[in-house]
Amino acid sequence: MALNRIWVYAEATDGTVAPTTLELLSKARELAGTVEAVHGGDASDIAATLGEYGATKVYATGDLQDSLPGVPVASAVAKLIQDGDAPDLLLFATSYEGRDVAARLSVALDKPVITNNTDISVEGDDVIVTEPVFGGTKLVRTRFTTPAPNIALFRPKSFPAEPAGGGAAEVVTIEVPDHGTAKVKNRHVEETTGPKLDEADVVVSGGRGLGEAEKYQMIEELAKLLKGAPGASRAIVDAGWVPYSYQVGQTGKVVKPNVYIAAGISGATQHLVGMKGSKHIIAINKDPEAPIFSVADLGIVGDVHKVLPKLIEALQNR
Amino acid sequence: MNVVVCAKQIPDPAEPGKLEADNTLDRSGKLILDESDSYGVEMALQLVDAAGGGEVTLVSMAPNGETGGLRTALAMGADKAILVSDDALSGAGALDTAKVLAAAIKRAEPDLVLAGTESSDGYTGTVPEQIAALLGVSSITFAKHIEVDGDTVKVHRQTEAGYDEVETTTPAVVSVTAGVVEPRYPSFKGIMAAKSKPVEQLTLADLGIDPSTVGAAGAGQEIVSVEDAPEREAGEIVEDDGEGHAKIVAFLENLKVI
């Protein structure tokens, strides 16, 4: 174990720690003797969970007063590091918040940042991260060549989240030198029912092959029958058929359900990256050459407008 | 209002990607405008129009003085372009790219800088925020709607749960998601006009950047290996004979999902 101390950037919504944060804390415990968290916000209600997953301390900025986190959190962490309290490595999730903070921090510290990784190893004094490219067909391993602390970002579900059973993390409030001028004025939450897309056991996604927005109802119906979550390809999100929060893929959510059903999705790289880690994949597409069939365990070459209604009926009759 | 749009020129994503001997992406062939950046170009044209005037300047970094993708954006209606091309930039990381783009952007003195949230080839997704930090200006990422009212920038910012209304003041950097606007197709007139629009070609020396601080020499990272990812085992592919749905039901039963 060549690393002494790792900081994990902790994200949370309304007191619930993001699954990606728990995944990174779990992995960090394997790599370093001391794991600590950094949080943009008040950490008092997440300190117990962070501790349970191995963080002994959480450096928290306190309430950000509706600032976007990039500027305030990066300025606070940079100050901590420049004042001499530096970790060997900083881990972030490849998320909205994670990318903003990591990007600002990389400039403040003049350190490179490597995103979209799915694995990390420490070999001697080297920290090596693994990033899938070309739609996940190749794995690139990259070594940091600058002195610590370096910054690496990871895709969701890269590591299993396993509690370590530790006590609550000690909350250390850190100074925020710059709050920035970007302020959130209003928040809008799109209501969803059923399991969350990235936590569901079954995901049913629809794509352009559905033909028109109204046909997406079949996807929702099928997802409901299988107690799963409905998802979508980028094409139909861009077309405005469903909200962005449904998008599975490189620029959307990464899902790894037990069963993934792709209906009318050709399987662009952009989409495959987000779902090829699923345990079982079923694809329905009328084009036998569609790339989605290259990752399917069961592929039905056929018209979604014929197969889906029959499938829904068969499930309803059970 | 003057708007700079970061416009990346990338190898055609429809073609299989190739790597160079040093394991960097082969960018030697024809490059096209990254579709992710066409949204920024369209947004910029609309914002300048709404503001009653101003210029849209493209800023790009690409090898071999490549301008193919920039001509597409100029044909859409952008006024001019700045292209940074330098052999020393091969192997540049996200921070290096941001340093180069920020230096070029400064020359255009924009009120607003627009960029895609991430490129379609490297998809690091940090460059817009890094540019903002280097320029010392505010930033809002993942915009799905933008309005400029005087010196206030109002953005609907995509979130995990929905969207936030976020405001900041100019100058600012905003990264736009796909779908923020529908990019126009260049007209024949636009394509003809683009041929004579100015493209300023710059090197690192022109920008006063030391080549040893960016590109492979300054990236702070080194590719150790590139390996084939383990492939999924081939599955069962069947033609729907009217009973395709029964295959799916049996598959799900076998997994005890139903």
Image: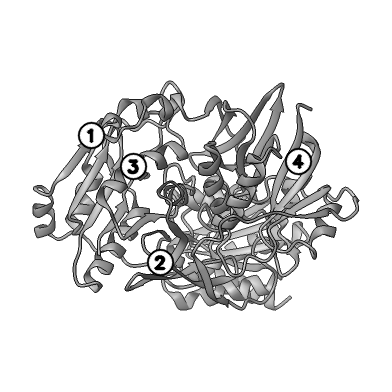
Query: Looking at the image, is A269 positioned above or below residue B242?
Result: above
In three-dimensional space, the C-alpha distance between marks 2 and 1, rounded to whole angstroms, equals 34 Å
In three-dimensional space, the C-alpha distance between marks 2 and 4, rounded to whole angstroms, equals 38 Å
Q: Quadrant of residue B53?
A: bottom left
SS for callout 1: helix
* Chain of the residue under the numbered disc 3 shown in the image: B
Residue of label 4: A28
Q: Is residue B168 visible?
A: yes
SS for callout 2: strand
* Residue B63: percent from left, percent from top: 29, 32
Residue of label 3: B103
Residue of label 2: B169
Q: Quadrant of residue A4?
A: top right
Q: Give a yes or no on whether discs 2 and 3 share a subunit.
A: yes
In the image, which disc is placed on residue B65?
Answer: 1
Query: Looking at the image, is A249 positioned above or below residue A214?
Result: above
Give amino acid for label 2.
Thr
In three-dimensional space, the C-alpha distance between marks 2 and 3, rounded to whole angstroms, equals 21 Å
- Front one among A167 and B8: A167
**Residue B184 shown left or right of residue A254 in the figure:** left
In three-dimensional space, the C-alpha distance between marks 4 and 1, rounded to whole angstroms, equals 43 Å
Give amino acid for label 1.
Gly
Nearer to us of marks 2 and 1 is 2
Of pointers 2 and 1, the one earlier in the residue sequence: 1
